[in-house]
Amino acid sequence: MSVQADTLSMPPADRQPRSRSPRRNDHRLRRSAVPWLFIAPSLVLFSIFAFAPIVVAVVLSFQDVQTFGGGQWIGLQNYSHAVTVQLFWQSVKNTLVFTLGTVPTSALIGLVLAVLLNRRLPGRGLLRSLYFLPMVVSGVAVSLIFTWMFNTDSGIVNSVITQLGGPRVNWLTTPRSAMATVVAAVVWGRIGFCMVVYLAALQNISSTIVEAAEVDGASRWHIFTHITWPLLLPTTYMLLVLNMIFSIQAFDVIYVMTGGGPGFSTTVLVQYIFRSAFTDGKMGYASAIGVILIVTLLLLSVLRNHLGKRAEENVA
Amino acid sequence: MSTIQTRIRGRKRGARRDRMTLSRWIIWLILLVGGVVMAFPVYWVFVTAITPGGLAQDSGLHLWPSHVDLGIFGQAFKANPVGTWLINSIIIAVIAVLLSVSISVLAGYAFSKYAFRGKNLLFGLLMVTIMVPIQVIMVPAFVIISKLGLVNTPWSVILPGAAQAISIYMARDYLNAIPSELIEAGRVDGASEWAIFRSIVMPVCGPLVAVLTILTFVWRWNDFVWPLVSLQKPSAYTISVGLASLNGTFSHPWDQMMAITLISMIPVVIVFLAFQRQFVEGIASTGIK
């Protein structure tokens, strides 16, 4: 790769092996230089704003870097420190709870909606729009809307509960319900996405198979469990892993709604990284946690490819 | 054209309606109730934003405004630099769309139609960046931005955001479906590689450009974490960062907060309603493969 990049800056005439015929040279030259020119603008931006920061983050994770001073190599100390700190494990646990709360729920609701809305129903387009709409609402807006709706004193949710004779709930100020509220907000924003992905997959399923089964007198449930669901497995694996990546990266809703609190009850890993780097000023330590997270995500994606392939083989 | 199509579809649907059984009607009703619940938070923003004091302060249950006061928007604008935030967001979103869509289509074309050394490796590396949470690279990225003197400028959000691996992925995927024979034919005719891209490839990229434009606009408009770090003075905030900065300060009543929230949502909701089909296709195609 770097060889190719270097050759770009050389005069074109010099860079081809001499032994080939000039015409073929010309052709090959064009073929090899041109794609790099097309990629160059993206490559420059990626190098500066993605690749370089990733490399630096990995380097920082082995250093004692703080806001002021530091910068000595300390080997794996940041990593060994992380695994002994209770807050790290607390945020791992919170990340798991948050992920388990958001991923299967939004996927399942999305699946049910997609199956139901894939049939012909009156006003189907409008219904789909109602479910899609939350998808475009920004994380910040979602957070503020839910903070307002779940406000203890004048939120609509508590109004409804007290109207029905129930007690006021301190949604965002008690640890357990704070996590539940954050999860609800994220699920609300993500159902539309899951539904879209499932709808697209459903539309790829050939209707002749389904119709043939209908002619044979198979029930809807039977058709779903024996035809549709197996065909949706690759989509499901893909969606679950993608959702997991989203959930592990989810930041804005928690940052705005709870700031990771009350206590550390909603502090997930990315929140903890942000906190360590910007509030505590421990950049090296924050980078180490980040590297742990990236490696975990990479392993997840390998798993995704593996499971995806297996699912496809099963279908075939 | 599209109205004719919907009318035909409508008639077809009408014909099938006779076959709606009771169980189908029950499902339909459940879907409708569910849809109303899903849309309720958005409705609630709207109601809160046009109802002064009353709704926000007493604890009774109101589902619609007792009286309407559009003056809340004026108060919200006066109390906060909402106008500046909106302009910042528009500048960032528009330039980011132009830049990001152009370079992603160019890169996607190279990955789709050329063979070159290191192609798969480079593509793999680009895809890995999708998985890297922004928090992990925030500190080094911020150092780079400040070395370049871009902190508090729109470019600090535009440039890093223009490099979107997912957009390159979508562009490559779209162009894979375009027959390479078209391009070969251009080469046989002696057209330059750039001319081939301009006059053969670009004209068939309409749907791709539409999807990328819509998605990029929504992404940049809704962006939060990175602008939160790179834009540090209130006059440089985007609407999302500005909106979040109002949260938790007790001086901001909920009617004004929801008024600004509503304003922040309007552009994406319009884009979504106008281009729902492309939007949905875009999401489906990023997810599906």
Image: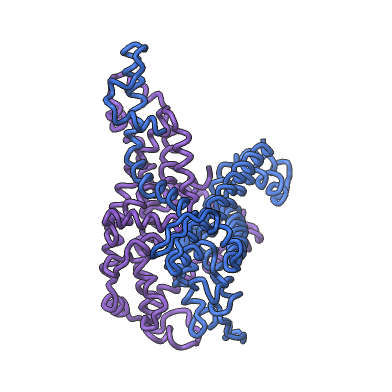
Chain colours: A blue, B purple
* Picture quadrant of residue B50: bottom left
At a point 48% along the width and 57% down the height, the residue shown is A287
Q: Residue at x 42, y 53 (%)?
A: B276
Residue drawn where x is 53% and y is 45% of the image: B288
Left or right of B198 in this view: A84: right
The one of B3 and A106 positioned closer to us in this rendering: A106
Q: Position of residue A216 (x, y in %)?
A: 73, 41
Front in this rendered view, residue B36 or A87: A87
Taking depth in this image into account, of A248 and A112 the one nearest to the observer is A248
Q: Can see residue B29?
A: no
- Residue A271 drawn above or below residue B277: below
Q: Position of residue B109 (x, y in %)?
A: 38, 34
Residue nearest the observer in this picture, B127 or A186: B127
Q: Is residue B189 above or below residue B172?
A: above
- Residue occupying image coordinates x 60% and y 86%: A167
**Is A194 left, or right, of A48 in this rendering?**
right
Residue A165 in view: yes
Location of residue A242 in the rendering, given as x and y in whole percent from the top left corner: 55, 51
Q: Position of residue A316 (x, y in %)?
A: 67, 35
Numbered label tally = 0
Q: Quadrant of the N terminus of chain B?
A: top left
Q: Is residue B34 above or below residue A299?
A: below
